[in-house]
Image (cartoon, rainbow, N blue to C red):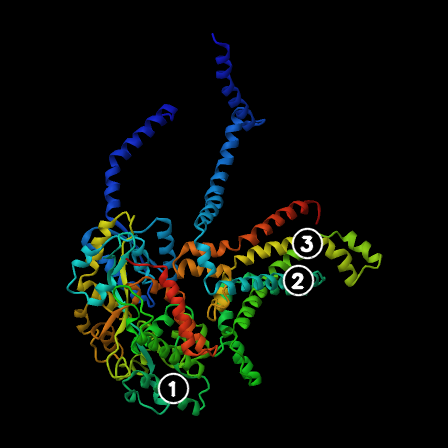
Amino acid sequence: MAHLTRRSMLRGSLALAAAKTVGGPYVARAAATTAAVWFAQGFVQDEDVALRKAVADYEKQSGNKIELSIIPFAPERQKIISALTSGVVPDLVDSNPAEILQLYGWQDRWVDVSDVVESQKGQFSETALVAAQAYNNVTKKRATYGVPLRAAVVPCHIWKSLVEKAGMKIEDLPKTWDAYFDFFKKVQDNLRKQGERKVYGLGFQVTANGVDPYNLFMAFLVAYGGQDIVTRDGKLHLDDPKVKQAAIKAAAYLGGAYRDGYVPPSAINWNDADDNNAFHAKLMVMDVDGTLSTEVAIKEKHPEWYYNEIVTHGAPGYPNDNAGKPVPSIVGYTNGLIPKGAKNVTVAKEFLKYFIQPKVIGEFVELGLGRWLPVMPSLAKSPFWQNPKDPHLKGYVQQGLLGPTRPDYYVFNLAMAEVRTQHVWSMAMIDVAKEGVKPEAAIDKAFKRIGEIFAKYPMA
Amino acid sequence: MDTASVVEIGRPSVRRDSIWRSLRGPLKGSEYTWALAFVVPYIAVFVTFVAYPVVYGLWMGSEPRLYPELFSDPIYQKTVVNTALYLALGVNVKLFLALLLSGFFMRPGWWMKVLLMIFVLPWAVPQITTFISIHWMLNGEWGFLNNMLYTLFHVEGPHWLNDRWTALGAVIVSHIWKWTPFWTLILLAGRMAIPLEIRDTARVDGATGVRGFVHITFPLLANLYLICTLLSTIFLLGDFNAVYFVSGGGPANSTQVLATLGIRNAFEIAQPRLGVAAVMSALPMVIPLVIVLMRKLRTAQVQL
């Protein structure tokens, strides 16, 4: 038996070091085929299963490895921001929150992915292509930094059973904006006459938490004709009388509905999940809330609710404006983003190219129960989305993909993202709803704050 | 040979020797190596987990442009007022209750031990689930509290979380409920450390009940009570959970405190430096507190 001496230890160590040097390229090669991917956890488990399947299929076909981290929504957002702040970044992230694309695009922190998008350019909707871009304040140019993966709009979720309980019919829903929402006030009045103490007509998120209140206000702003608040060149148009009138009307309707008792009082302090919970508890007849999460969350446990008791939009579909013209829906996108400093940009791009093939990305959204919309109009024609037995999917895809759509305003000017996160519209709604402020005064205050925020983001 | 040059050449080596000797201290031979081996891991951990984060935080919040932006935020002033109220009421009410309760739990009897065990439960259960439960309990429409009020008295309770003052009150009460048991235990330990002889002598001299508390117990506990107050103030200043999970900072951002504002700025508005600036704006209060605390800890060595 050999004795362990200092000399033999040295020899052994040298041999190990030499072996590592020879073996080095193998490890390096292995690292080059691995990409770290972060993605937000789904609202229902099926979404995560769908993502894992897409990743597994890619790994099988390519031989590359994807280190997938599925992280709950809020912690993932914090993790992404922390990673970008520290500079230690993964290879691919989803845009969580959506405006992170524009926010860090402004700072020149994303890899240009126009070559990836180009591989399926003809398939994407025009709105998706525009929303994948951001203004870069370093190069002073717009560029494509996002790869559209899925989309969402803000549909109307309605308890058909409560409408019928009130002695009314869902088929009688008016087609124009104000009349459509006024219908639910009548439903509430009728239910109260029947002794229903705590059912409210409208689930408006008149709150300063989360993303829902901004989406709600913007839907009303556009419906009332204020769609030019920010134009494609990134310019703000608060001096446009049409924009101001639309904002005043939106604050008046949304705040007024709360003040008049048609919105659950707790709505003033709801977070993004509270309206879903309140809707499921039948606290209100209808809710205006992004994605189909409200419906898919109960599909497995309460199929009778999904198929018989809840409808999306109701008979007329997404309501027209008060003049009878279709209202464009603002679409929010989840984009794939590659941070600058990522170690394996090549694999990340390859994976994205694989992922956005119509068959793959179509299957991804369908396996996720249709909570999210596809980003390619051709996919909307699939039997899944056009299923006549499903009371939700057809109306949802019509609203968010086949009907008139537009990207969110922070795509044109990043300042609008801060308007959203600082809850400027929320404060206007709450001023009207709770503080008794006149809508005109509430909007004057909001416009002043919006002007201050836009001044921080000068665009060339 | 030039004498002057020899002197000059010799000087640095003499200086190096004396520095080296002062570094080594009384340690000889391998003792110094061993000492280094024990100290280096501690220094590495300290630098990595204490010094680096603090310096990084200071660096992140060091840009002067952050502060005008922070102060121009419409909710900042309200947040400072909320933080002051949260600290003043949260710390003082909690510690005063803890002081009284620690006296109550000094009573003899097995049932007192059982009661103490039940009493510490709020502190023992996980705080996030507790605060979420309180949030739901206070919901105006379907919360437990208002439903109970309606069922028992046919009274429609207020919407506790819809008003700034009731929501902030709910946060403060939740904090007091959660942390009073902990500080009660600390003060109970302090009371138990008072030698029996002192209490017995005082009793013989007629200092019983309130007089005993005022003249004997409280003076002996005063230093501990002050340290608890300072520590609790520092803990509370960084407390995020009670506000975030009970009131959510709402309604309309009216119950934010500096800790939650920092998180909001860092991750919701996605401006981490502005988030750090919000927390840093509390430094003028934290630093004097830490200095006083350190001084008190030093004097505490010769007191109870």
The amino acid type of the residue labelled 3 equals Gly
Q: Which residue does the image show at 37% across and 55% down from the upper left?
A: A81
Q: Nearer the viewer, mark 2 or mark 3?
A: 2
Does B282 sit above or below residue A244? Answer: above
User: Could you say whether the residue bearing mark 3 is in a helix, strand or loop?
Assistant: helix
Q: How crowded is mark 1: few (under 14 residues within 10 Å), some or many (20 or more)?
A: many
Does A437 sit above or below residue B37? Answer: below
Q: Mark 1 points at which residue?
A: A185
Q: Do labels 1 and 3 share a chain?
A: no
Q: Nearer the viewer, residue A218 or B188?
A: A218
Tell me residue A165's x, y (percent): 37, 89
Q: Which chain carries label 1?
A: A
In-image side of B103 versus A225 (left or right): right
Q: Which chain carries label 3?
A: B
Proximity of marks 1 and 3: CB atoms separated by less than 8 Å: no
Q: Which residue does the image show at 81% across and 59% down from the upper left?
A: B207
Q: Mark 2 points at which residue?
A: B96
The amino acid type of the residue labelled 1 equals Lys
Q: Name the residue under label 3.
A: B190
Tell me residue A316's x, y (percent): 25, 84
Tell me residue B153's x, y (percent): 58, 84
Q: Which residue lies furthest to the right in this view?
A: B205
In-image side of B188 versus A66 (left or right): right
Q: Which of marks 1 and 3 is in front?
A: 1
The amino acid type of the residue labelled 2 equals Phe
Q: Which residue does the image show at 51% across and 36% down from the upper left?
A: B39
Residue A299 visible (yes or no): no
> Does label 2 or label 3 sit earlier along the sequence?
2
Q: Which of B302 and B167 is in front in this view?
A: B167
